[in-house]
């Protein structure tokens, strides 16, 4: 078997792609994606994958598939799938790559170095498979008894010398940036995410390239922001839900997410957040914790590759706040399985 991988998606591929997925609009999704890869064997399409991204720091990898002529356990099947991942990662260096995966490919994603996310949610819609999701409000054992964390969307209001609204009623939610400037957006992101500086040029590119943006205003003051990147029909991912710390605790974050839900027309809406926001997203009855979202940071040539999730067994307690401790909160241990997966 000699597989040829290509990033070129041309009108010649239209029928092959649409037939491969059984969807008359899939070619357009591939053509308009941030990057994609097709795998051909002697002129026949045998595998494909594509990525949705705003072109800055994050990417959502979807539609990883191989021809049905390769049965489970066929080494050629995994060779093609791993080849597609390897090839497309070449265009994703320096990015956090999320995979909206499937149960059948769990071991393959792990083999490719992707961690299984603990903190990914999907807007649960009728017709989705219950087995792909955890029960509403599910918490992992390590999350019981934890001290509540201050998170961008939900926290304790701080009276920093100004009057705080007693509720969110006077804070208005708007579609798009409205009157907000990119420096104002950047300021809210920086303040909301624990003072971590955000690059203004990246912020402007990320929001200008997003499919949906919603904002929250107290008068003319920008106090909240959220965005989503989408492919125009199938997948959307929610990003940067952030509320000014002075306005946290007023349900503004919840209103921003729900406004995005109203705007997003894609079938599958996924979000992946940090461990401190678990309680916030667990209070959305319409969202369910997804068992099959994976993530990997594709390091650039000058970057130090982050540590991969590790299995337990050493008996050594990880230092609080260390990279290993953070990754333990972000991912299940390598080889972790839920009871219905054994």
Image (spheres, rainbow, N blue to C red):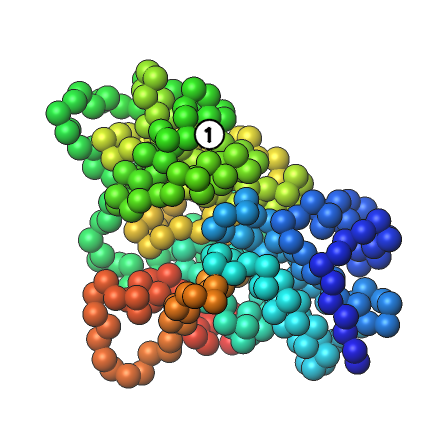
Up/down of 292 relative to 163, above or below: below
- Residue at 22 percent across and 75 percent down: it is 317
Q: Is 133 on the left-hand or right-hand side of 241?
A: right
Question: How busy is the neighbourhood of tag 1: few (under 14 within 10 Å), some, or many (20 plus)?
Answer: many
Q: Secondary structure at mark 1?
A: strand
* Residue shown at 20% from the left, 23% from the top: 164
Q: Considering only vertical position in the picture, is 67 above or below 293? A: below
- The tally of labels here is 1
Q: Is residue 95 visible?
A: yes
Q: Which residue is located at x 46 percent, y 29 percent?
A: 214
Q: Position of residue 136 (x, y in %)?
A: 43, 50
Identify the residue at horizontal 79%, vertical 80% (top origin): 1
Q: Quadrant of residue 4?
A: bottom right
Q: Nearer the viewer, residue 143 or 117?
A: 117
Most distant residue in the front direction: 302
Q: Residue 76 at what x, y percent from top left?
A: 73, 79
Say whether residue 18 is visible: no
**Quadrant of res 32:** top right
- Residue 250 placement (x, y as % from top left): 28, 30
From the image, tell me which residue sits under label 1: 214
């Amino acid at each position: 078997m000699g597989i040829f991988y290509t990033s070129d998606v041309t009108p010649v591929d239209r029928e092959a792609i649409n037939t491969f997925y059984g969807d008359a609009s899939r070619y357009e999704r591939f053509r308009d994606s941030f990057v994609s890869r097709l795998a051909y064997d002697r002129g026949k399409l045998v595998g494909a994958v594509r990525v949705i991204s705003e072109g800055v720091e994050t990417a959502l990898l979807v539609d990883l598939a191989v021809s049905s002529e390769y049965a489970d356990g066929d080494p050629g099947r995994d060779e093609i799938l791993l080849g597609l991942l390897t090839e497309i990662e070449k265009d994703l260096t320096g990015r956090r790559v999320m995979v909206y995966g499937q149960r059948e490919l769990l071991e393959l994603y792990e083999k490719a170095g992707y961690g299984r996310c603990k903190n990914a949610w999907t807007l649960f819609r009728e017709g989705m498979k219950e087995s792909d999701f955890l029960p509403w409000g599910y918490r992992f054992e390590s999350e019981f008894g934890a001290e509540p964390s201050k998170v961008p969307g939900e926290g304790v209001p701080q009276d920093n010398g100004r009057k705080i609204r007693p509720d969110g009623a006077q804070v208005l939610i708007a579609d798009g940036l409205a009157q907000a400037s990119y420096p104002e957006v950047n300021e809210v992101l920086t303040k909301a995410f624990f003072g971590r500086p955000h690059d203004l040029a990246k912020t402007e590119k990320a929001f200008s390239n997003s499919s949906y943006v919603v904002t929250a205003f107290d008068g003319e003051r920008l106090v909240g922001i959220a965005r989503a990147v989408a492919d125009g029909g199938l997948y959307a991912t929610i990003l940067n839900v952030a509320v000014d710390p002075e306005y946290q605790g007023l349900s503004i974050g919840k209103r921003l997410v729900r406004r995005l839900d109203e705007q997003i027309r894609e079938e599958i809406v996924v979000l992946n957040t940090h461990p401190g926001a678990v309680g916030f997203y667990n209070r959305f009855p319409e969202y369910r914790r997804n068992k099959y979202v994976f993530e990997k940071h594709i390091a650039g040539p000058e970057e130090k590759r982050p540590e991969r999730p590790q299995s337990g067994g050493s008996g050594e307690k990880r230092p609080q706040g260390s990279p290993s401790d953070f990754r333990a909160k972000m991912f299940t241990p390598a080889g972790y399985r839920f009871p219905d997966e054994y």
